[in-house]
């Protein structure tokens, strides 16, 4: 059985990375490469896209630009890549959210089979955060507060991975909530920092700076083991939800029409960039782990995530948007 942890291992993809440098006769890429980020600037996907763009371009000998194409929980940007025919356009997104879109909506502006995986890049656990003024310092106190008044939980969009992870917490604890979707993670954490909504689960890369700046307070980490950067913060699993784990799994998807040789070369280049000592140290400092995979394993990961979250969607039923 394919699981997230069996796919997400830093050892995967080493063979592809070792394949570089590639033959001089390889014509691709022969023009500017474009990374589509389906969420607004400032979120985890955007941060990682801008980190890798320059070194990826240097490795492949072409400029790499990043374009934010937002809307519909990433579906607008995903559609732009799915329908691209130039072999130079890729999607950098939270792979879980991409998989969820395929099972959440029957009216996507593209067909899920039009996209294939190239490689995973990094994993960043969700931080369960609230405004510093909110009267709770852990999961138990948060649930108790929700019994007095339903908590407004922000997310990066309906059906996003952080939305469904919050629903999973609510189902496990009886937490009362109302869902407030935004167009991306950056907007959702800004709204919680401002005190307009009370809670959000968001990727550590984009969220930790606001925690360190005192604008957000952490109630829990969505990894099964504690994070060294915030070792004093208990995991959500430690606080009573056994084996709970969620997070943002950043990766690259490409049009399924892209030739296999091109996908393999792109995957190899991406893996070499993300596994470089400099990039690894920058990601670790931000609260992320480098995790790579072959194109086939990335596609299998998307299928496994779709199955996991599709099951949660069925269990939650009408409670997806709140249960107050």
Image (spheres, rainbow, N blue to C red):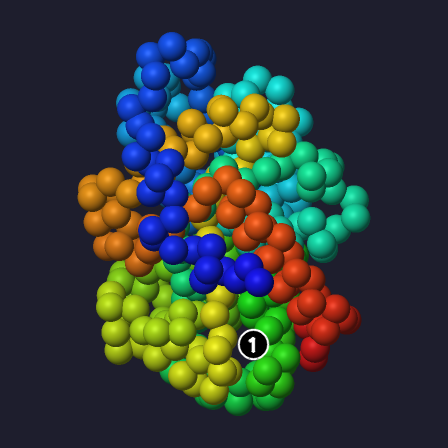
Q: Quadrant of residue 289?
A: bottom left
Mark 1 closeness class: few <14, some 14–19, many ≥20 residues within 10 Å:
some
> Residue at horizontal 65%, vertical 41%?
75
Residue 105 placement (x, y as % from top left): 75, 51
| Near-viewer residue (133 or 50) | 50
Q: Residue at x 27, y 63 (%)?
A: 212
Q: Is residue 316 left or right of residue 97?
A: right
Report x, y in % for residue 163: 59, 63
Using the rendered view, name the quadrant where residue 19 is placed. Answer: top left
Q: For the point 46% across and 60% down, which residue is it?
A: 6
Give residue 90's position: percent from left, percent from top.
51, 31
On the image, the x and y values in percent for residue 62 come to: 36, 17
Picture layout, residue 56 above or below residue 193:
above
Q: Is residue 76 above or below residue 230?
A: above
- Left or right: residue 320 versus residue 130 is right
Q: Quadrant of the C terminus?
A: bottom right
Vertical relation: 11 (above or below) 91: below
Question: Can the viewer see residue 182 in this picture?
Answer: no
Q: Provide the residue designation for mark 1.
A: 169
- Secondary structure category for the residue under label 1: helix
């Amino acid at each position: 059985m394919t699981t997230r942890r069996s796919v997400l291992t830093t050892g995967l993809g080493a063979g592809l990375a070792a394949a570089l440098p590639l033959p001089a006769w390889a014509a691709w890429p022969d023009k500017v490469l474009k990374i589509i980020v389906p969420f607004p600037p400032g979120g985890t996907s955007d941060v990682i896209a801008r980190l890798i763009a320059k070194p990826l371009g240097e490795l492949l000998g072409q400029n790499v630009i990043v374009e934010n194409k937002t809307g519909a929980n990433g579906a607008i940007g995903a559609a732009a890549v799915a329908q691209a025919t130039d072999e130079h356009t890729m999607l950098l997104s939270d792979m879980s959210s991409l998989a969820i879109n395929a099972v959440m909506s029957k009216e996507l502006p593209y067909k899920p089979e039009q996209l294939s995986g190239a490689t995973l890049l990094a994993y960043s656990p969700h931080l369960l955060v609230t405004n510093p003024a909110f009267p709770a310092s852990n999961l138990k106190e948060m649930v108790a507060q929700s019994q007095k008044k339903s908590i407004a939980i922000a997310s990066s969009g309906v059906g996003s991975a952080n939305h469904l992870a919050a629903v999973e917490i609510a189902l496990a604890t009886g937490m009362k909530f109302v869902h407030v979707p935004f167009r991306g993670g950056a907007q959702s954490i800004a709204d919680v920092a401002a005190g307009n909504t009370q809670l959000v689960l968001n990727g550590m890369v984009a969220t930790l700076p606001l925690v360190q700046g005192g604008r957000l307070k952490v109630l829990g980490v969505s990894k099964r083991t504690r994070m060294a950067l915030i070792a004093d913060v208990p995991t959500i699993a430690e606080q009573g939800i056994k084996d709970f784990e969620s997070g943002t799994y950043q990766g690259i998807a490409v049009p399924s029409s892209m030739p296999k040789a091109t996908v393999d070369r792109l995957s190899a280049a991406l893996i070499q960039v993300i596994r470089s000592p400099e990039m690894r140290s920058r990601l670790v400092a931000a609260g992320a782990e480098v995790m790579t995979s072959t194109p086939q394993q990335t596609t299998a990961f998307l299928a496994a995530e779709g199955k996991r979250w599709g099951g949660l969607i069925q269990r939650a039923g009408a409670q997806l948007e709140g249960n107050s």
